[in-house]
Image (cartoon, rainbow, N blue to C red):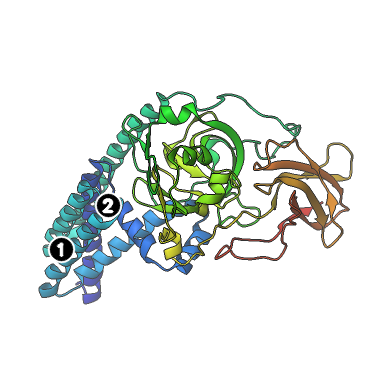
Amino acid sequence: MLTNGDRRRGGGIGAAAVGLAALGVGEAIAATRGGSLIDTLGRAAIDAVPVPVVEAAVAASGRHDKIATRFGIGAGVLAATVGLGALPDRLRMPVTAATGAGVAALATRLPTRSMSTVAGAVTAAGVLAAGLRRRPHGLLGTLAWVATGAGMFAAAHTLQHDLDRKQDNDIRRIGPMGALGVVPQDGLEDEPGLSPLVTAAHRMYVADVNLRPPRIDPAHWRLSVTGKVAHPLRLSLDELAEDAVEFDAVMVCVHNHPGEGRAGNGRWFGVPLADLLKHAIPEVGATRLVTKAVDGYTISLPIEPLRSGEWPGYVVIGMNGEPLTPAHGFPARVFVPGLYGQYTGSKWLGELELTDDSHVDYWVRRGWPAGPLWVTPQARIDVTAPGRAAAGTTTVAGVAWAPPHGVAGVEVRVGEGDWHPADLGTELGPAAWRRWRTAVELPPGEHRVQARAISRSGEVQEGRHRAPFPTGPSGFHSVTVQV
């Protein structure tokens, strides 16, 4: 005989099955036009939660933050469904209807909105209300709802995949963006395990508040330069490519702790912002350049250092000889080498607006300083291996960066001993990372090896550990070596 506890557990499982089906149906409808109900809810959660929660989530999930967010949203929806199912009958339907209306309203308000996402939210609420009115009974009924949800998620995945493939084909037809296939060398190519001199696009870290890149048709896309300018501009990809130049630079996430992989070195292809500003002619009172993504997300920069060339900023349209990938901002992004990624400019660029100091950026509203925050010198250890040149030695090698001035030196120490200089590879450019290598004598036992970078401006990497918020991380990368 079933107890009340057994019935509650069975009812909770049935409600979760209904929630899975409702979410799957909503996701499939949203995907017909490239939207995503889960991603909409995820963006809303990112926008709403306090910055300390965001920082803790980034620290816990690392480079898998988007996957973790999606799973968190899915688990939250199922938990909420179980809660709705536990309400008394007289409250369940009104609360379910109010919840569905709230999600639909949210989908219309967010910058990632689309009518398919709104339709998906409304339909999901309807499925949820119908399913909770007569929850599945027995194993077969529950499995039927689960199968419906799984099938709808599979359909949504297929729709999204087809749209992604179409955009990839559109991007491939664009052709090279820069010197495709040119592989630079720095003299340290013989060191196994050392990071590549240029980071492949699929290896470059990705960090943004969107769970999925917006899909943009390159044939119809235009970059608008608007606001306080004498000559507004509207430029196609082909027109930007005519004036683009290639440059090497490291891009670093503000959440990159010493030794982590939220940093990559690219060979970028872009138009200097100084040239665009020269053509547009800023008006009196124009003090900020607002870099605006197609979904409305903004990062702003002071105009004067960009206009004078003191800050070498670019509208980037290519990476490593090819167009940008969707994850990295196709068709264009703004990049100022030396600024942390959170401050360097928007991806999926649609507009450059010249305005006054009244504009407030997304992350400033969330509590980060107005900035800009500059990347500090940092060295990372990639290799600690038995030395090949002489017995009894250990090879220590890695990469270091100090944009925009460049790396003047890298030093290594064992334990609390003295710092000793390492050999540097040939520099690609002052804003790029620089590979280094040295050999150290280590007796048998356990040893802590540390590295630090020194910039050409004289700045020495700070050894005191500091969390990323609010001014960026610091500390030495330490590796324990057992000989």
**Image coordinates for residue 290, horizontal then vertical, percent:** 43, 51
Question: In percent of the image, x 16 and y 70: which residue is there?
Answer: 95
Residue at 39 percent across and 60 percent down: it is: 46
Answer whether residue 185 is visible to the viewer in this image. Answer: yes
Q: Amino acid at mark 1?
A: Leu
Q: Nearer the viewer, residue 350 or 60?
A: 350
Locate residue 339 relative to residue 454 in the image: left or right: left
Marks 1/2 in contact by CB < 8 Å: the verdict is no
Q: Which residue is mark 1?
A: 132
- Marking on residue 37: 2
Based on the displayed image, in which of its 4 quarters is residue 215 positioned?
Answer: top left
The picture places residue 260, in percent across and down from the top left corner, at 61, 52
Q: Position of residue 298 (x, y in %)?
A: 41, 53
Q: Secondary structure at mark 2?
A: helix
Residue at image point 56% right, 50% down: 305
Q: Nearer the viewer, residue 389 or 267?
A: 267
Tag 2: Cα neighbours inside 10 Å, few (<14), some, or many (≥20)?
many
- Tell me how far mark 1 sits from mark 2, CA to CA: 20 Å
Expressed as whole percent of the image width and height from the top left, the position of residue 173 reads 40, 23
